[in-house]
Amino acid sequence: MRSVRVAVYAMFVMAMTAGGQEKPNVEELKRQTIAAIDARQVFTQQMVDQIFSYAELGFQEFETSKYLTGVLEKNGFKIERGVAGIPTAWIATYGSGKPVIAFITDIDCIPRASQKPGVAYHEPIIEGAPGHGEGHNTGSAVNVTAALALRELMEKYKIAGTLKIFPGIAEELLGSKAYYVRAGLFQDVDIVLGVHVSDSFETGYGQHFAPQGLVSVQYQFHGRAAHAASAPWDGRSALDAVELMDTGWNFRREHLRLQQRSHYVIVNGGDQPNVVPSEAAVWYYFREIDYPHIKELYELGNTMAEAATMMTGTTVTRKVVGEAWPPNFSKVVAEVQQKEIERVGMPQWSEADQTLAKALQKEIGQPVEGLKVKVEELKAPSPATEQGGSDDVGDISWNVPMVYLQYPANIPHTPGHSWVDAVAEATPIAHKGSTAGAKVQALTALDYLLSPELVQQAHEYFVNVQTKDVKYVPLIGPEDQPAIELNREKMAKFLPEMKKYYYDPAKYKTYLEQLGITYPTVKGNNP
Ligand SMILES: [Zn+2]
């Protein structure tokens, strides 16, 4: 027995020295990983700035995807484009064999959030244009930097395993992940490490982040057109149906569970007042904290829509345009990741960073506290009546052991989904936060690349605890298709003007420099 072991060990050492350098111990490997990421700070900064300048809405992330796949391809990743029936979606793969570790992060932006970075008050680059008012431009810098550093080490020391990088397409529309899952893109994946921008450095388990799930659905009402003055009795107004549905929902809202959130926008209200609207449409998000309640809320919405048709003599059709399961992140993977967060620690903020942060907080009437300086403790699931929001990574988390790292690349107390959240996103705050995030991402991946036991532990916890009682059932039907037509016109309208502002790293060190912005630009001198 003993001699067999010795022989196996000898073969292992021979394999190591034949194929690559002998592998140092884990601590030394981690030290080298951190050094490899520090060496890529300029690369990380350029990626943050580049994607910030593209600012593309969900399903229209063409420039961003072209850029990212180009960088990854140049660095030895194999690219598969147009996955899951989504033109801007792709998978980048490096390495071979087990374990398979996937990185994912969103790449889309927010309507009307155009904002000059580093300026602590509202000043759009282009009035009304989309902008990274959530900071999704930083996530790919985190993932790609981490992946390139890991690739370097895997090659040098012949570390087995596969890295896969996914973009979160149209996350703001909850538009893609259920389709990724349906297309089987995670079937061979062992661990998914997602990242999302934040003002804090943290991870957690269960429903600790964006704790709700939802169905996003458009109701199209169909009536009959008529002259609104000379023959109104011949018309049947689709807009009446929209208004009555909304009125009904707003009365019923009082009697719904506190855990729900629901909201709508009227996407088509007719053409002009003297034509009885034959077509009108309203778009609803129905959010709740578990699958049965999401279904219940959605069915109530359908009932209201039907009821509105009865009141108005119209008909209704509906189209699901997005969905998300509430998240279910892995406790055992989060515990591994937490140690890496504590190892890396918060970025060193400069006085200029703090000045920008405080000036922005003052500008929007929030506590003037500046940037966070301490990492958070491991986050347990949070009560969903306090926190709202959804993220369609939830669907992935019910299919593969997954965690969602939040890295500190934004200013605390911002409202989310607005120009305010874009202010820091192409400044040193975002650059340093992304470097810190990349370190944790790479170190966590390394933990799993080096330890089959940890992979096994995550798998067992997933089967025996995480998904023991609740099984994933997609909220999309078999006929539903990704709503890839969304945002097409909105993006086309701004694209020609936006192209003039694309970041050119060959000419300018930073996007701030290209735009001629003094960092930080604040009202008065003293925030
Ligand atoms: Zn997001």
Image: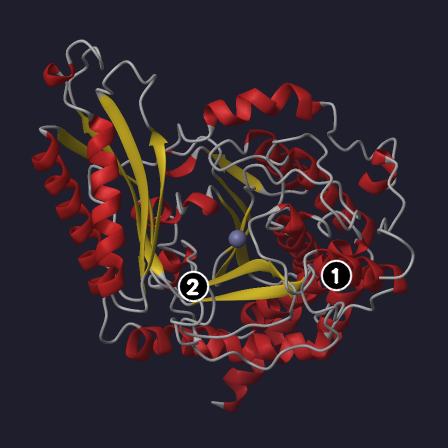
Image position, residue 66 (x, y; %)? 60, 31
SS class of the residue under badge 2? loop
| Left or right: residue 57 compared with residue 318 | right
- Label 2: how many Cα within 10 Å (few below 14, some 14–19, many 20+): some
Q: In the image, which is nearer the foreground, mark 1 or mark 2?
A: 1
**Which residue type carries mark 1?**
Lys
- Badge 1 vs badge 2, beta-carbon distance below 8 Å: no
Image position, residue 481 (x, y; %)? 29, 35
- Label 1: how many Cα within 10 Å (few below 14, some 14–19, many 20+): some
Residue at image coords 24%, 46%: 247
- Report the residue that reaches farthest toward the bottom: 2
Res 463 → quadrant: bottom left
Residue 362 tag number: 1
Looking at this view, is 24 or 462 the one in front? 462
Residue at image coords 42%, 43%: 173
User: Disc 2 marks which residue?
Assistant: 388
Tell me: is circle 1 under 8 Å from ligand 1. no
